Amino acid sequence: KNQVEQSPQSLIILEGKNCTLQCNYTVSPFSNLRWYKQDTGRGPVSLTIMTFSENTKSNGRYTATLDADTKQSSLHITASQLSDSASYICVVSAENTNAGKSTFGDGTTLTVKP
Amino acid sequence: KAGVTQTPRYLIKTRGQQVTLSCSPISGHRSVSWYQQTPGQGLQFLFEYFSETQRNKGNFPGRFSGRQFSNSRSEMNVSTLELGDSALYLCASSLLGGGEKLFFGSGTQLSVL
């Protein structure tokens, strides 16, 4: 059964600090992994996509990594800002899948405090 | 290019009533998927429509149904509402579905009293 597990479930950090969110998956055959950011009361917005051949990808202060061998991904946030407070969702898609068959993690809720 | 539009933004209903939510995808997108999100829970997949056909369905009771029109706009209907149906309902669109990037609407916050 395809599964995506995210850790930690929630995280509180001080503004300006760095943090790393984890995503472990058992989706097979792997196609891609996306990180989404969801602000409270809003829909998720895609941050990055990782494919099998990619190890690292950056989007501003967000850096995603992928280890396809261990089936792990991380999202590193540098110099956090109050606006980074949100839920971060890891979504893994298998090859030849439809939108509904992508597997969603339960998300990590990040709170950045001043 | 306009984003995904969901209406209404907020909705209050009582138990036993039915409700219809609307989703207008990004122009040119043919796949529309629906999700339920309750506080502290991840997104739960309801169903996906592609070219007016339901392509995938999640593990929700038959009270939850949907449809897609020829212009790709989609509606979701929940009949005989229960208190546990209170949630944020999100729709997402993409060109063809699959592992593409999903573009989400802001959701409809449904409260069942």
Image (spheres, coloured by chain):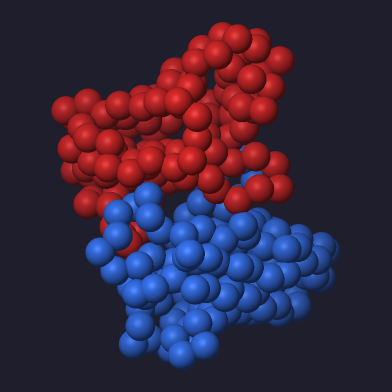
Q: Is residue A8 above or below residue B109?
A: below
- Which residue sits at x=37%, y=50%? A100
Tell me how many marks there are.
Answer: 0
Q: Position of residue B85 (x, y in %)?
A: 61, 27
Q: In the picture provided, is B82 more to the left or to the right than B51?
A: right
- Which residue sits at x=70%, y=59%? A109
Q: Report the front residue among A36 and A27.
A: A27
Q: Is residue B12 above or below residue B34?
A: above
The image quadrant where one finds the N terminus of chain B is top left
Q: In the picture provided, is A83 more to the left or to the right than B8?
A: right
Q: Position of residue A48 (x, y in %)?
A: 44, 70
Residue B10 visible, this orientation: yes
Q: Report the front residue among A18 and A23.
A: A23
Residue A96: quarter of image: bottom left
Chain A painted colour: blue
- Which residue sits at x=53%, y=65%? A3
Q: Is residue B73 above or below residue A70?
A: above
Residue B73: quarter of image: top left
The chain displayed red equals B
- Which residue sits at x=22%, y=26%? B69
Q: Position of residue A107 (x, y in %)?
A: 62, 60
Residue A113: quarter of image: bottom right
